[in-house]
Image (cartoon, rainbow, N blue to C red):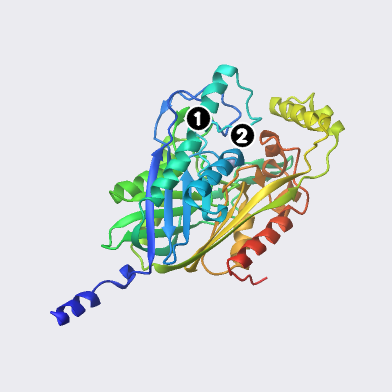
């Protein structure tokens, strides 16, 4: 009998060997109840007209052998601003004892989802009647995010976790150089990162419990003429993975796709096609040999301070006669800050690191981070690194020094729609990499600069 047991144990595949990790997953439907203004495109003229695909908030909770926990919350949304994510994190801290560094909120940046109160707040000037569903949605959303994180923590069970990376080719640099400056177009020569990191979570009996896939590309296959709610390619990718693996939860994490667009775009069939391409990359990784992930987990989080380029009251007085309605709205907001003697010179910026002792480190950056950050972080911190953007606070685009110097939408124009006073100061990349250096040091990851 003893011999038989020994043989039985010996044939258990290595990948399923327990490493003391537990994981839990949960999902909550965050599809708007009725018509609501959609975010992402200023050209929109009315509220949503129907639902093509449900939107989800999903949570993956992971606990190491010593009880150290993290919760990764992904959302099929344009972007969660700090005014939503901070109170949710505070509630989770109070109710579950989770420190801020142990909760990561990521947004898929779908442009066919609802307008989120506090994000891109100068994009539209809504009537009170149109405003009401947006405010109502934000209130319900906060409760649902707490709920989904708690449900994942309540679902913890022994698992094995593995890591691998595939590739999908549809991300295209969108900063096209023209005689009139940089426009949003296609730039086949511009930097991209086609890698698609994958984390696999399996229960003790080898059943697939969760798949997390990440990619650096705007979730904008569907353009301004689409008025039906959906998760765009990221939504289709998650649905395809879940269809392929009944019972498993697929989570999408947006990386530094601030200056990347899907190519080609502007058709529903293309959103499905890109989703299928990402799902296919995932299948390739799942069927290859993946690297085992082990704890303990180490986490660090800080809010660093980013500075804006100098501005004066006169700048905004001039902008009051702008032909761009959002620029006039921004100017009024900024003049009010001058009136109140509280002109905005800096903004807090969240930087987070989550490190598995063996396996990937997740570096999570706020805002619509351009791909330069991802490429540089991977150069300076070799070893598996997942560089998420759109995390914890989607406050603005985050240009690199290069992009800032070149100008264009990600550097200058987008700041109007985010209600920010203007472009960042020249040292934005330095400040963020200094902060990255600090959080990486705190989790014990050494750089190779
Ligand atoms: Zn964007």
Q: Which mark is residue 290?
A: none
**Do the CB atoms of the residues marked 1 and 2 lie less than 8 Å apart?**
no
Q: In the image, residue 209 lies at what x, y percent? A: 33, 55
Q: Quadrant of residue 119?
A: top right
**What secondary structure is marked by label 2?**
loop
Residue at (46% x, 23% y) in the render:
35
Above or below: residue 210 compared with residue 49: below
Q: Is residue 431 left or right of residue 311?
A: left
Q: Quadrant of residue 83?
A: top right
Q: In the image, residue 122 lies at what x, y percent? A: 66, 30
Above or below: residue 243 compared with residue 10: above
Q: In the image, residue 285 lies at what x, y percent? A: 38, 61
Q: In the displayed image of the protein, which residue is found farthest to the bottom? A: 3
Q: Quadrant of ligand 1?
A: top right
Q: Quadrant of the N terminus?
A: bottom left
Above or below: residue 341 compared with residue 405: above
Q: Quadrant of residue 408?
A: top right
Residue 58 can be seen, yes or no: no
User: Could you say which is closer to the camera, residue 217 or residue 347?
Assistant: 347
Q: In the image, residue 75 lies at what x, y percent? A: 47, 43
**What secondary structure is marked by label 1?**
helix
Question: How many numbered marks appear?
Answer: 2
Residue at (45% x, 49% y) in the render:
252
User: Could you say which is closer to the camera, residue 148 or residue 206?
Assistant: 148
Q: Is residue 426 left or right of residue 148?
A: right
- Ligand 1 contact, mark 2 (Cβ < 8 Å): no
Q: Which mark is residue 118?
A: 2
Tell me the residue that label 1 is attached to: 137
Residue 153 can be seen, yes or no: yes
Above or below: residue 351 compared with residue 184: below
Q: Quadrant of the C terminus?
A: bottom right
User: Could you say which is closer to the camera, residue 333 or residue 18?
Assistant: 18
């Amino acid at each position: 009998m003893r011999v038989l047991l020994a043989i039985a144990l010996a044939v258990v595949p290595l990948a399923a060997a327990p490493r003391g990790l537990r994981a839990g997953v949960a999902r909550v439907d965050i599809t708007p109840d009725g018509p609501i203004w959609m975010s992402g495109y200023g050209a929109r003229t009315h509220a949503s007209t129907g639902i093509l695909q449900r939107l989800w908030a999903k949570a993956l909770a992971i606990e190491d052998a010593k009880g150290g926990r993290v919760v990764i919350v992904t959302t099929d949304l344009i972007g969660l601003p700090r005014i939503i994510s901070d109170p949710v994190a505070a509630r989770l801290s109070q109710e579950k004892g989770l420190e801020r560094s142990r909760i990561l909120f990521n947004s898929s940046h779908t442009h066919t989802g609802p307008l989120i109160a506090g994000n891109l707040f100068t994009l539209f000037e809504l009537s009170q009647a149109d405003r009401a569903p947006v405010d109502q949605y934000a209130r319900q959303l906060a409760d649902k995010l707490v709920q989904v994180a708690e449900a994942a923590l309540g679902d913890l069970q022994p698992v094995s976790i593995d890591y691998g990376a595939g590739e999908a080719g549809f991300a295209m640099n969108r900063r096209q150089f023209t005689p009139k400056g940089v426009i949003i177009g296609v730039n086949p020569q511009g930097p991209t990162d086609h890698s698609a990191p994958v984390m696999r979570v399996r229960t003790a009996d080898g059943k697939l419990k969760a798949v997390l896939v990440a990619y650096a590309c705007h979730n904008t296959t569907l353009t301004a003429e689409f008025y039906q709610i959906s998760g765009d390619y990221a939504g289709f990718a998650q649905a395809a993975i879940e269809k392929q693996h009944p019972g498993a939860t697929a989570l999408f994490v947006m990386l530094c796709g601030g200056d990347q667009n899907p190519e080609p775009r502007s058709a529903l069939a293309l959103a499905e096609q890109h989703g299928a391409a990402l799902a296919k990359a995932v299948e390739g990784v799942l069927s290859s040999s993946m690297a085992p992930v082990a704890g303990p987990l180490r986490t660090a989080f800080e809010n660093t301070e980013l500075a804006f380029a100098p501005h004066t009251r006169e700048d905004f007085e001039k902008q009051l006669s702008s032909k761009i309605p959002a620029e006039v709205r921004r100017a009024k907001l900024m003049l009010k800050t001058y009136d109140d003697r509280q002109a905005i010179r800096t903004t807090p910026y969240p930087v987070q690191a989550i490190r598995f002792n063996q396996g990937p480190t997740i570096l999570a950056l706020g805002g619509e981070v351009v791909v330069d950050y991802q490429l540089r972080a991977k150069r300076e911190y070799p070893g598996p690194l997942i560089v998420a953007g759109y995390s914890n606070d989607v406050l603005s685009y985050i240009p690199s020094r290069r992009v800032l110097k070149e100008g264009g939408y990600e550097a200058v124009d987008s700041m109007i729609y985010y209600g920010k006073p203007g472009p960042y100061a020249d040292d934005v990349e330095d400040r963020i990499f200094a902060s990255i250096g600090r959080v990486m040091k705190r989790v014990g990851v050494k750089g190779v600069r």
